[in-house]
């Protein structure tokens, strides 16, 4: 399958093309199970309670801030935990799969003439390794990362400034309440996806501009 057929005519004029910025874990990569088991493995070391499998649904109903509050992991320890999570995830890259249907949905957006990028708390190295393994690297114009849970808004803002992208043309796509929060903070539109780490219910409470249940709906949202 061609990743990007440059010879296809653009279906939309450049002035209506959007810059669609994606979160990675849970939005593009089906990594919930990997992150869940790594988090449990690191529980003792970082001094937070592990989560039994039967509590997964309850966990998905908690906002990112609530999960952090309950874990009692200090903001001071958080970067160390994130760094460990990244290096443990690095061992799983070859086994990770994309969310079913996401690759076709991204191809569709690209063919429509939109520009795609990734902003993640995971490492750039992990994300690029995954994209290359899945033959998806060429879909994205940029992949940026920050060792932060709640600072994604700032990273997106820097990208928009550097690339001279008008905030009104940008839209963020993420699976966690902190993604919705980040987009809100910098005043860009946001699509919450229900196939990742958070449930539709808790995402809806953050009032994203759109909530979608399957990747094929991405293209529909862009026509709004
Ligand atoms: Mg995510």
Image (cartoon, rainbow, N blue to C red):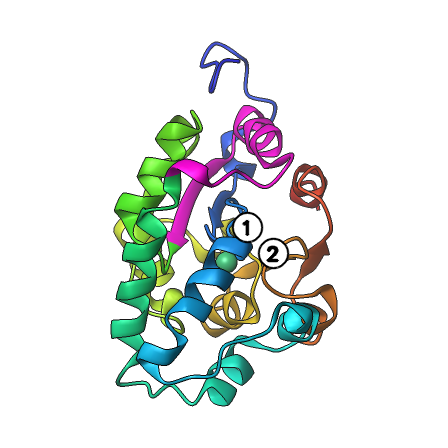
**Total numbered circles:** 2
* Alpha carbons under labels 1 and 2: distance apart: 6 Å
Task: Determine whether label 1 and label 2 are within 8 Å by CB.
Answer: yes
Circle 2: element type: loop
Q: Is residue 147 shown to the viewer in this render?
A: no
Indicate yes or no: mark 2 CB to ligand 1 under 8 Å: yes
How packed mark 2 is, by other alpha carbons closer than 10 Å (few <14, some 14-19, many 20 or more), is many
Q: Is residue 197 magenta?
A: no
Horizontal side, residue 109 vs residue 7: left or right? right
Q: Position of residue 81 (x, y in %)?
A: 31, 72
Q: State the residue at coordinates (37%, 79%).
A: 44
Q: Is residue 49 shown to the viewer in this render?
A: yes
Q: Position of residue 219 (x, y in %)?
A: 67, 37
Circle 1: element type: loop
How packed mark 1 is, by other alpha carbons closer than 10 Å (few <14, some 14-19, many 20 or more), is many
Q: Position of residue 111 (x, y in %)?
A: 55, 24
Horizontal side, residue 126 vs residue 189: left or right? left
Q: State the residue at coordinates (72%, 42%).
A: 217
Numbered tag placed on residue 47 in the rendering: none
Horizontal side, residue 121 vs residue 162: left or right? right
Magenta segment: 94-119
Numbered tag placed on residue 27 in the rendering: 1
Q: State the residue at coordinates (32%, 46%).
A: 91
Q: Is residue 87 above or below residue 218?
A: below
Numbered tag placed on residue 196 in the rendering: 2
Question: Residue 152 versus residue 95: which sits nearer the camera?
Answer: 95
Horizontal side, residue 81 vs residue 2: left or right? left
Q: Is residue 108 magenta?
A: yes
Q: Position of residue 54 (x, y in %)?
A: 68, 70
């Amino acid at each position: 399958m061609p990743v990007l057929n440059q010879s296809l005519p653009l279906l939309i004029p450049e002035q209506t093309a959007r810059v669609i910025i994606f979160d990675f874990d849970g939005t593009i990569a089906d990594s919930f199970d990997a992150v869940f088991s790594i988090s449990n493995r690191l529980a003792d070391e970082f001094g937070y309670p592990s989560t039994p499998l039967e509590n997964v649904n309850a966990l998905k109903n908690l906002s990112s801030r609530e999960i952090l509050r309950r874990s009692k992991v200090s903001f001071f320890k958080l970067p160390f935990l994130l760094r460990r999570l990244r290096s443990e995830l690095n061992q799983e890259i070859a086994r990770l799969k994309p969310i079913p249907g996401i690759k076709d949905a991204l191809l569709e957006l690209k063919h429509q003439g939109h520009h795609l990028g990734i902003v993640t708390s995971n490492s750039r190295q992990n994300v690029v390794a995954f994209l290359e393994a899945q033959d998806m690297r060429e879909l994205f114009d940029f992949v940026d990362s920050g060792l932060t849970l709640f600072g994604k808004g700032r990273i997106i803002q820097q990208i928009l400034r550097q690339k001279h992208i008008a905030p009104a043309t940008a839209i963020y796509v993420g699976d966690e309440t902190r993604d919705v929060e980040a987009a809100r903070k910098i005043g860009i539109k946001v699509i919450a996806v229900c196939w990742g780490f958070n449930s539709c219910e808790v995402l809806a409470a953050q009032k994203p501009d759109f909530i979608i249940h399957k990747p094929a709906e991405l293209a529909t949202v862009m026509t709004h």
